[in-house]
Image (spheres, grey):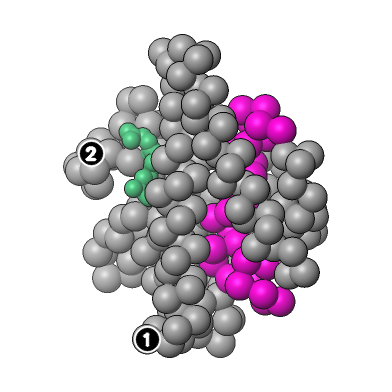
Amino acid sequence: MKLYYTPGACSVSPHIALCEAGIPHEIDKVDLKEKKTSTGANYMAINPKGYIPALQLDNGELLVEGAVIVQYIADQRPESGLAPKAGTMERYRLQEWLTFISSELHKTFSPLFNAAMPEDGKNIFRDRLAMRFGYVDKQLAGKDYLMGAKFCVADGYFYNMIRWARRVNLDLTAFPNVVAFEKRMEARPKVIEALKAEGLM
Ligand SMILES: N[C@@H](CCC(=O)N[C@@H](CS)C(=O)NCC(=O)O)C(=O)O
């Protein structure tokens, strides 16, 4: 498998999933401005959506959309326990988390990375994010991970969002369970492996 990624972007989530699942993989760095891969290939010809992450499967198919990619990765190694079995209520709970992270956190960060967005506008998104982090903080009370005692693919995605919060100076001190979760994630050898591979550590 080959993961198209950009260091520190939302592709960190499937990258962590690949490492946690122990799946041999290649990574190919995409320049999002130029829409070129590391070899200079036209990324738009590979993924007409133009964004990362994208996972090229061993049969040549391309899978896009982070929330789906991480479930595909988990399902390749069911014994890893990275996702509950498809069709179970627990699996819908995982999908509930992935959809929440994708639509309520991930996309709410986008304006904060946009240099053209005025500060007043950014504050609207900062306030919304703080509310959403507050929700997750309550959900994490008494739990090590989003789904309970065990790491699942939504944890890698949420950790990715915490890293972004740090980048845009979103204050997380009011969310002690989120901060404890961040430390827990940073102690995981496979998370370290993914971050190192992207040159983030
Ligand atoms: N719907 C996609 C969105 C992915 C996305 O927002 N990727 C960003 C980086 S974090 C990107 O590649 N942006 C460049 C672009 O849209 O041209 C997903 O959930 O995977």
Is 123 in front, or is 164?
123
Query: Which corner quadrant of the figure contains ligand 1?
Result: top left
Local packing at callout 2 (Cα closer than 10 Å; few below 14, some 14-19, many 20+) is: some
Q: Quadrant of residue 51?
A: top left
Q: Position of residue 2 (x, y in %)?
A: 41, 58
Residue placed under numbered mark 1 in the picture: 87
Identify whether 141 is placed above or below 150.
above
Residue plotted at (42% across, 76% down): 92
Region in magenta: 145-171
The response on whether ligand 1 sits within 8 Å of label 1 is no
Q: Amino acid at mark 2?
A: Met
Is 33 in front, or is 156?
156
Residue 11 is a magenta residue: no
Identify whether 181 is placed above or below 103.
below
Residue plotted at (40% across, 31% down): 31
Q: Nearer the viewer, mark 1 or mark 2?
A: 1
Asked whether, in this view, residue 57 is left or right of residue 135, the answer is left
**Circles 1, 2 touching at the beta carbon (< 8 Å):** no
- As measured in the structure, the alpha-carbon distance from the residue carrying label 1 to the one carrying label 2 is 34 Å
- Image quarter (top left, top right, bottom left or bottom right) of the C terminus: top right
SS state under label 1: loop
Question: Of marks 1 and 2, which one's residue comes earlier in the chain?
Answer: 2
Q: Position of residue 104 (x, y in %)?
A: 45, 47
Residue 170 is a magenta residue: yes
Is 176 in front, or is 82?
176
Q: Position of residue 21 (x, y in %)?
A: 56, 73
Residue placed under numbered mark 2 in the picture: 44
Q: Amino acid at mark 1?
A: Gly
